[in-house]
Image (cartoon, helix red, strand yellow):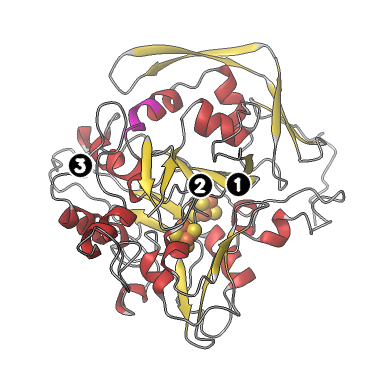
Amino acid sequence: MPNVKNWQLGRDMSYPFEERHPKWQFAFVFNTNRCIGCQTCTMSCRSTWTFSKGQEMMWWNNVESKPYGGYPLNWDARLLGMLEAANPGGQVWNDKGKFDGLTIFEAAKKRTAGPGGQQAPGGQQALGYLPTDDEMRSPNTWEDTPTGGKFKREGQYGDSVQLPEHKIWFFHLARICNHCTYPGCLASCPRKAIYKRPEDGIVLIDQKRCRGYRKCVEGCPYKKAYYRPTTRTSEKCVGCFPRVEGKDKTISPTGAPAETRCMSACVGKIRLQGLVEIAKDGTWVTAPENPLAFLVREREVALPLYPQFGTEPNGFYIPPRWVPRDYLVQMFGPGVQKAIDQYSCPDRELLAVMQLFRASRQVIFRFAIEKGPKVAEVEVTMPDGSSKTQEIYNDTVLGFNKADEEVVRITVEEPTFERAADAHVNSI
Ligand code: SF4
Ligand code: SF4
């Protein structure tokens, strides 16, 4: 297997194909602190792409309640267990932030390697499993179910719900296909029916080439590829590519990229989609004025989901502040505490950028900040118990689309409007 660079692991890794990178990469940031589990995103995707016969078990967008929920049931615990079995005690990050364990590609190679260390014919390219119909029957089992059996009942919840870590907790994890840099689905397909678009990195299944072997369902560690029995092919999230191509002129008359349906519909304003520019060697072009690049690479406040799987997912999450850190480190890697520290007491620039979540249906390629007056000082208790003063400025943040047209202008303080006493426009 060739060696490829994986910045999320802090090292190179084995992958079945040579590196080749798109010019732009579809990416997104979800703020788990804000998700209310309303499933509006889920239903907006469903009513757009997966309402037909044979698609009943397809939830290209799903929102699961962690730690117990998952679609398919226990998808992540199951794969983490398989990786642990392949490399007992070795699935760890070292203190420099490098992953010393095995990815799904390396674990598969180890399991099926022939005598010369070569991949055995017919062996798995990515460690994975095929979920059963039972595991896929209910998309939201364990909804809103907290964990924490050891909390004291006296005085009901007492100190069980105090930051930095609640003793009783759950959180909503919204998920779509991560349009990975090194997709497990693509690596596993014996028909080479899966491809990554050079213009935006969206991963698609060619329906004419697919023969429904379900190897992608097995090889996607996030279980975001699905089999459709009525067509005997597999299908997956298409990243709403017509919108990303700027085909919806009602959103942008000049044909600038629009956000996907699930992003646009998000009630909790937890989602920000973007396109990030990728250099020929696969690194992100330095662009601190791009909100995605700012949150992910510049500030590292948003982290990849299970980076240790090795697919270099392009979905990033601001971790939930109240959840035990060891659980979060397992899910998002070693940057959890740094991300939570920044999010707990955002500085002026970060607070301004955070206003861009769901402020426009167009993809924002650049932001700018116009400085405003200081409006408040707030004492914040940090996760380590120390105290910090947060200065809040009523800055105005501007967002620009791909054509560099201004598409959003929003202030940090939400403006209030008072209706004139004699205006009753809503009266019927
Ligand atoms: S999340 Fe799964 S289906 Fe999506 S690109 Fe990655 S491996 Fe493929
Ligand atoms: S629409 Fe937004 S807030 Fe509601 S469940 Fe989906 S991601 Fe969460």
**Residue 247 screen position, x and y as percent:** 79, 59
Please, what secondary structure does the residue beneath circle 3 have?
loop
Identity, as a three-letter code, of the amino acid under mark 1 = Gln
**Residue 316 screen position, x and y as percent:** 47, 43
Residue at the spot 65% in from the left edge and 45% down from the top edge: 24
Number of numbered discs visible in the structure rendering: 3
Q: Main secondary structure of the magenta part?
A: helix
Question: Horizontal placement of 205 versus 359: left or right?
Answer: left
Which of discs 3 and 2 lies nearer the camera? The answer is: 2
**Residue 262 screen position, x and y as percent:** 59, 57
156 magenta-colored: no
Residue at the spot 66% in from the left edge and 27% down from the top edge: 289
In this view of the protein, which residue sits in the foreground, 191 or 120? Answer: 120
Residue 415 higher or lower than 140, as above or below: above
Residue at the spot 60% in from the left edge and 40% down from the top edge: 280
Give the extent of the magenta segment.
334-338
In the picture of the structure, the residue carrying the numbered disc 2 is: 314
In the picture of the structure, the residue carrying the numbered disc 1 is: 25
Identity, as a three-letter code, of the amino acid under mark 2 = Asn
- Proximity of marks 1 and 2: CB atoms separated by less than 8 Å: yes
Quarter assignment of residue 250:
bottom right
Please, what secondary structure does the residue beneath circle 1 have?
strand
**Residue 129 screen position, x and y as percent:** 30, 69
Badge 2: few (under 14), some or many (20 or more) residues near its Cα, within 10 Å?
A: many
Residue at the spot 57% in from the left edge and 74% down from the top edge: 50
Closer to the chain start, of discs 1 and 2, is: 1
Q: CA distance from mark 1 to mark 2?
A: 8 Å
In this view of the protein, which residue sits in the foreground, 92 or 47? Answer: 92
Please indicate, yes or no, whether residue 38 appears anywhere in the rendered image: no
Q: CA distance from mark 3 to mark 2?
A: 41 Å
In the picture of the structure, the residue carrying the numbered disc 3 is: 156
